[in-house]
Amino acid sequence: MKKDHVDPPFVLPASLFHGTSESSVAGILKHGIIPRKLAKKDNWKHTISSNPQMVYLTDCYAGYFAQSAVKKDERWAIVEVELEHLDEGKLYPDEDCIAQTLRLQGHYIAIDLNTLTRRIRDSIDEWQEYWELSVRGIGGCAHRGVISRDAITRIALYDPKSNPFITLACLDPAISTLNHFFCQPKYSALTRWLMGERIRLEDLYSEAELSVMRNDAEPYLQRVIEALDNQQIEIVHVRKT
């Protein structure tokens, strides 16, 4: 059957992001971003532990991952990494993307998703060529080994208490292929906001949602505008682009 609509070719973003804690910044500035095997610290305990040899990168969920790494009263740190400065041979898919995609395609239905994800994680070398599809499918990929300081452009520091609206907006996604398919523009915009860039209401809401809010929830809409303007971000410039 001929398709009437052809999706545009996927274009990799120039940069991906790593969400971590302010207490990690000094080490990152000195040594780069190091994987859990060297850091001996596991911040991801929502489902199964991450691959200890990898540093995980995302195009849109950096705030969510930063919150998983911080201690009480600590600022989030969002690290911007330029893809062109990474060795493509060290880039791998996120195991969650591979496992969820296989399940959506009808494979391994009899296997518990966590079990399947763990199997993919432990055999990730077999899936290395799919790292770009992982960025497209779930909004992230993994890098084997240390990410050099030379690949890092900026680090943004954000106090989650300074802007409850932005903080809660960053924390509400389910990290899944389905969420990324529908909501990637919103979370990408939030990540840009965390990096000190200005975003618009249209980056967060559809035209239909904005129409309803303008008619029935104007006070709420005004609070959103005020939250977007309340941008208390400290930028550490690591390397000029």
Image: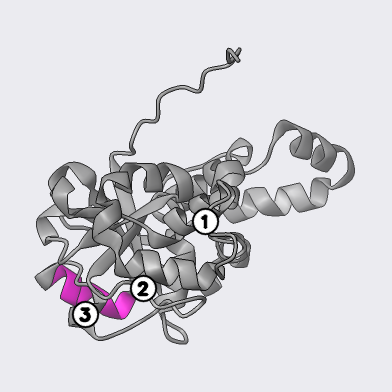
Residues at marks 1 and 3, CA–CA distance in whole angstroms:
25 Å
In the rendered structure, the answer to whether residue 131 lies left or right of residue 69 reads: left
Instruction: Please say whether residue 230 is one of the residues in the magenta stretch.
Output: no
Provide the major secondary structure of the magenta segment. helix
**Alpha carbon distance from label 2 to label 3:** 10 Å
Indicate left or right for 127 with 102 as reference. left
Answer few, some or many: residues within 10 Å of disc 1's Cα (few below 14, many 20 plus, some between 14 and 19).
many
What is the x, y in percent for residue 231?
A: 48, 56
Q: Quadrant of residue 39?
A: bottom left
Which secondary structure, mark 2? loop
Q: Identify the residue at image location x=41%, y=72%.
A: 118
30 over 73 or under it: above or below: above
In this rendering, would 239 be left or right of 158? left
Inspect the image, locate mark 2, and give the three-letter code of the amino acid beneath it: Ser
Residue 50 is labelled as 2
Residue situated in front as seen by the camera: 169 or 7: 7
Tell me which amino acid carries mark 3.
Lys
The region drawn magenta spans 22-30
Residue at label 1?
Answer: 100
